[in-house]
Structures are given as structure tokens and as C-alpha cells.
Image: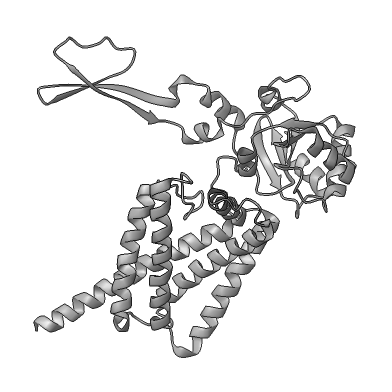
């Protein structure tokens, strides 16, 4: 009787662990496929931390898609109990490698966030290490009791589900490179009011500040404007609670005019008309195949009197001359932070359309609109 109960308990635990692992891998693989360039930038951070600065970007893109493919596929296999022996061993091997990597980043802190869940969920390096240790333990438990894992599909349809999931996640990742992420987890998504976030970022109330005192086991929390307590109270700490995370994330967004040296961020955000931002983080490695469309859009904006800014982190004149020589560009360049520009739009070049300081549309270099499509977009928002 005890053995039967033990086997029943083990079977339940094995399948609970398997479902947790499956959901984790499915979610992690999906968010990476949803935002391949986000994974690329995180991988480049890792590579830079070990001195591999010159790794070709196309190789990193392939690696990012393959990582999404592996994680999502493992999630599908664990979810349905497909090829239990092989998938359980692969899960243990994968989590062992990931745990070793997170031990490294926990000790040396080459990046502040491992990027395992993209921008959907940001974890500290300590939290990531703890998560991976728990998942590794679950993976080992599932592997040791793999025969108790439920098989939810008949043999005849396993191959169909397997093939569809593997093909689908790769196609989805490529689609998100072409069309930009389907779900935008970043603070610069369509609909974001950059003007309001800019005002919030400069507001001293961005953080809720509490000063903590203690006396005889009793705790007292005061605001900075409150009077200090009497000398019987001992100061403990000052708590700062973030009240607007998106405002903080967008606080690094700035636009500088290289000719005057002035910051023109507010001029751009407080323009009540349509404003076009051409985003090219690095002029030396941007896609030049779409420049004819860019030039056509730029000419149209000048005819209609709309503001057009080319934002780049390439402040050196050589890079700007290089771009002009190769593309015949006539638009002026304005300087911004490279990391922020890569967050604004996952493309190079990418085009962002603002109205009253609000992001109303974004396009990548592979999906720039035709003039007719652009005019239709302007018409829809011209209220």
C-alpha cells in the first residue's frame, strides 16, 4: 500500500515538474522568437564580456533563432511527453549549461539581466541563478523518473505536433525580424505617450521615498517632508520605491543636435504634428537595401512640412559621411544613445511615427510602408 502511494506521489510530482519545465521553456522560447533582435543584443553583450567583439551579426542572429527553437521545442516535447528519454536528457544537459552560465554572470556580473525571458520578465542575476538551480533539480527528477511522465499524444500524431512546432517557431521568429515583434514588451511600444513619460521621468515623485526609524522593536516610516522624530528613535534606512518603471526606462531617451550641441528632446516630443524618427543606431552596419524607400518618405515629409529626424549613436563625421556617400541621404543626423535606440525599434534602419508625442506606428527596414500606406496611416490619426 505504501509503495503504491509512493509511486502515485512520484508520478504526480514528475508530471508537475514536467509541466513547470514545459511552461517555462515554452514561454522563454516564445519571447525569444517574438523578439529575436533583443536576444541578439543580449548575446552580443555576453560575447563582448569575453572579448568577442567582432562576431558577425548574422551568426548571432542564427544563434538567437536556434536558442528560441531549442527552448520552444523542448517545451512542446515535455508538455506532451514526446520521446521522453531523449527530451529528459536534453533538458538536463541544457539546464546544466544554463546554470553554469548563470553562475558565471552571478559572480562576474558581465550583464545586469541574463535575458532568459527577454523584456517580458526582468530578473536579477541572483534570481536567475536560483531559478535555474530549481529548474535543474526538476529536470534531473523528471529524467530519473521519465517512465512516469504522461504521454498525451498518440504515436501517429506525435510527429505532426513535433514538426509543426519546430517549423512554426522558426517561421514566427523570422516573421518578427521582418515585421518587428508581435508583442512589444518594451517601454517604447506603439501607443506609448513619450511626452507623459518624459514629464514623469523629470518628476521628483518618480520614487516614493520613506525614511525608516526604529525604537524598542517599533518601526516608524516618515516621508522626507515630515519632521524628524525625537532622539529616542534610531535611523534604520531610506526606502526608495519606484512608482513608474516605464518613465525610468525612457529617462535615458534624448536627442541632441550635433551642430548646436543642444538637447532637442522636448522640441521633438512637444511637436503637435506628425514627427518621423528614422532610427539607425550604427551607421556603419545598417541595412542599405531600404534607402530608396527611406529617401522617398523623407522627400514626402519635406513636401508636407512634417519634422524628420535621423537618430543615431554614430556621432563621428566619418560614419555620417560614409552613410551619405553610400545612400545619397540628405537628411540631418541627430545623436542619441545606441542602447536606447535599439530598444525604441528592433531594426536598423527603423522608422517611428509620433503624433503629439505619442508613438502611433513603427516599421522595420524590411517592412517600411509605401507612400500610399503611409498616407493611409496619417489619415487615420489626423484628428
- The residue that appears at 83% across and 42% down in the rendered structure is 323
- Which residue is at 28% across, 72% downward? 141
Residue 273: horizontal and vertical position, in percent? 75, 29
Write down the quadrant of residue 311 in the picture.
top right
Nearer to us in this view, 298 or 332: 332
Q: Above or below — where is 24 with respect to 239?
A: below
Camera-side residue of 62 and 361: 62
Q: Quadrant of residue 296?
A: top right
Q: Position of residue 151 (x, y in %)?
A: 38, 82
- Residue 304 in sight from this viewpoint: yes
- Asked which quadrant contains residue 232, the reply is top left
How has the structure been colored for display? one colour
Residue 297 appears anywhere in the view: no
Residue farthest to the front? 51
Q: Quadrant of the C terminus?
A: top right
Work out whether residue 113 or residue 35 is closer to the camera in this orientation and state it: 113
User: Residue drawn 67% across and 25% down?
Assistant: 265
Indicate the position of residue 331 as horizontal and vertical percent values.
84, 34
Residue 369, placed above or below residue 269? below
Residue 6 drawn at (x, y percent): 15, 78
**How many circles with numbers are drawn on the protein?**
0
- Could you tell me which quadrant the N terminus lies in? bottom left
User: Is 42 positioned to the left or the right of 14 in the image?
Assistant: right
Figure check: 290 above or below 319 = below
Taking the spot 58% from the left edge, 58% from the top edge, the residue there is: 34
Amino acid at each position: 500500500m505504501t509503495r503504491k502511494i509512493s509511486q502515485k506521489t512520484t508520478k504526480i510530482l514528475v508530471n508537475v515538474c514536467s509541466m513547470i519545465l514545459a511552461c517555462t521553456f515554452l514561454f522563454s522560447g516564445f519571447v525569444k522568437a517574438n523578439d529575436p533582435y533583443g536576444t541578439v543584443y543580449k548575446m552580443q553583450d555576453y560575447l563582448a564580456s569575453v572579448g568577442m567583439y567582432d562576431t558577425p551579426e548574422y551568426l548571432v542572429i542564427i544563434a538567437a533563432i536556434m536558442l528560441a527553437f531549442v527552448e520552444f521545442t523542448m517545451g512542446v516535447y515535455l508538455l506532451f511527453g514526446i520521446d521522453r528519454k531523449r527530451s529528459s536528457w536534453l533538458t538536463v544537459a541544457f539546464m546544466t549549461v544554463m546554470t553554469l552560465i548563470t553562475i558565471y554572470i552571478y559572480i562576474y556580473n558581465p550583464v545586469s539581466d541574463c535575458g532568459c525571458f527577454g523584456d517580458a520578465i526582468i530578473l536579477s542575476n541572483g534570481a536567475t541563478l536560483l531559478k535555474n538551480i530549481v529548474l535543474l533539480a526538476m529536470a534531473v527528477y523528471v529524467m530519473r523518473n521519465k517512465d512516469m511522465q504522461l504521454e498525451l499524444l498518440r504515436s501517429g500524431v506525435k510527429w505532426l505536433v513535433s514538426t509543426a512546432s519546430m517549423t512554426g517557431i522558426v517561421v514566427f521568429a523570422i516573421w518578427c525580424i521582418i515585421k518587428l515583434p508581435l508583442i512589444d514588451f518594451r517601454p517604447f511600444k506603439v501607443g506609448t505617450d513619450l511626452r507623459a513619460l518624459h514629464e514623469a521621468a523629470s518628476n521628483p515623485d518618480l520614487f516614493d521615498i520613506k525614511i525608516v526609524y526604529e525604537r524598542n522593536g517599533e518601526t516608524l516610516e516618515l516621508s522626507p517632508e515630515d519632521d524628524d522624530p525625537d532622539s529616542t528613535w534610531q535611523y534604520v534606512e531610506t526606502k526608495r520605491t519606484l512608482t513608474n518603471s516605464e518613465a525610468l526606462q525612457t529617462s535615458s531617451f534624448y536627442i541632441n543636435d550635433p551642430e548646436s550641441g543642444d538637447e532637442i528632446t522636448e522640441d521633438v516630443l512637444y511637436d503637435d504634428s506628425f514627427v518621423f524618427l528614422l532610427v539607425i543606431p550604427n551607421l556603419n552596419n545598417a541595412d542599405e537595401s531600404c534607402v530608396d524607400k527611406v529617401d522617398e518618405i523623407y522627400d514626402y515629409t519635406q513636401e508636407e512640412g512634417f519634422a524628420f529626424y535621423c537618430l543615431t549613436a554614430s556621432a563621428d563625421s566619418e560614419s555620417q559621411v560614409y552613410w551619405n556617400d553610400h545612400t545619397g541621404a540628405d537628411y540631418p543626423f541627430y545623436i542619441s544613445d545606441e542602447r536606447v535606440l535599439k530598444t525604441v525599434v528592433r531594426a536598423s534602419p527603423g522608422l517611428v511615427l509620433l503624433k503629439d508625442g505619442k508613438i502611433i506606428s513603427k516599421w522595420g527596414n524590411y517592412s517600411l510602408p509605401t507612400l500610399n500606406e503611409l498616407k493611409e496611416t496619417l489619415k487615420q490619426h489626423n484628428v
